[in-house]
Amino acid sequence: MAKNGLVIYILLISLLLDQTTSHTSKFKARKHSKRRVKEKDGDLKTQVEKLWREVNALKEMQALQTVCLRGTKFHKKCYLALEGLKHFHEANEDCISRGGTLVVPRSSDEINAVRDYGKRSLPGVNEFWLGINDMVTEGKFVDINGVVISFLNWDHAQPNGGKRENCVLFSQSAQGKWSDEVCRSSKRYICEFTIP
């Protein structure tokens, strides 16, 4: 009888071990399956995010093409002259809100392109803002992003405003030469958009 009890006991333990192993295998399979679902979810999220970035890039390109159609294109930039007079900071904020910055000519070719476009799009306007200033350090002229300007096109005896005149104007009558001006002055402006 004791032998039968021992045999039954061994059989029960074997069955329990078998069930536990089976249950553990199912649990691991389920856990692995959940991991695969999470990985797929992660992949889907990544793909959706990538698609949204591509859609936004296409929207930006479409907006830039619209800007280029309304303004003019030169190399990898579009210029767009805007209506109204604004002080330097307002003009720059308006350009930024449209996806660009105030225009910054970085070569004599760009000076000529901006000058020609300005004559066509701002008839009778002699000067307009450039996205250049020396507000942080007197005499150190930088663009809107704080990058030092290496190409300079100052008019004779310019800059001459000292700490009072920290923003830069483009002069049509001086053939695209620059002068410094009080940033609170109200002037016309041209926005610049970089085409990728």
Image: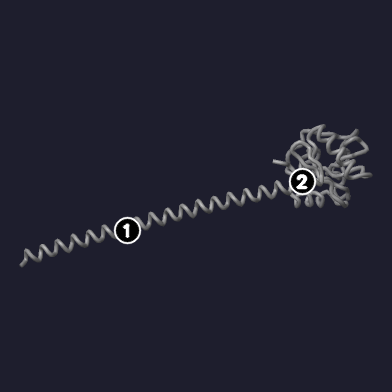
Q: Identify the residue at horizontal 83%, vertical 45% (top origin).
A: 190
Colour mode?
A: one colour
The three-letter code of the residue at mark 2 reads Thr
The three-letter code of the residue at mark 1 reads Lys
Query: Please, what secondary structure does the residue beneath circle 1 have?
Result: helix
Q: Which residue is mark 1?
A: 26
Residue 22 visible in this rendered orientation of the protein: yes
Query: Please, what secondary structure does the residue beneath circle 2 have?
Result: strand
Name the one closer to the observer, 184 or 12. Answer: 12
Name the one closer to the observer, 96 or 56. Answer: 56
Q: Identify the residue at horizontal 17%, vertical 64% (top origin).
A: 12
Circles 2 and 1: CB atoms closer than 8 Å: no
Q: Position of residue 97 (x, y in %)?
A: 75, 52
Q: Who comes first in sequence, dot 2 or dot 1?
A: 1
In which quarter of the view is residue 160 placed? Answer: top right
Marking on residue 181: none
Marking on residue 101: 2
Give the distance between the C-alpha atoms of the residues marked 2 and 1, in whole angstroms: 60 Å
Q: Quadrant of the N terminus?
A: bottom left
Q: Identify the residue at horizontal 82%, vertical 44% (top origin).
A: 71
Whether 57 is drawn above or below 2: the answer is above
Q: Identify the residue at horizontal 20%, vertical 61% (top origin).
A: 15
- Asked if residue 2 lies left or right of residue 97, the reply is left
Q: Position of residue 128 (x, y in %)?
A: 87, 44
Q: Nearer the viewer, mark 2 or mark 1?
A: 1
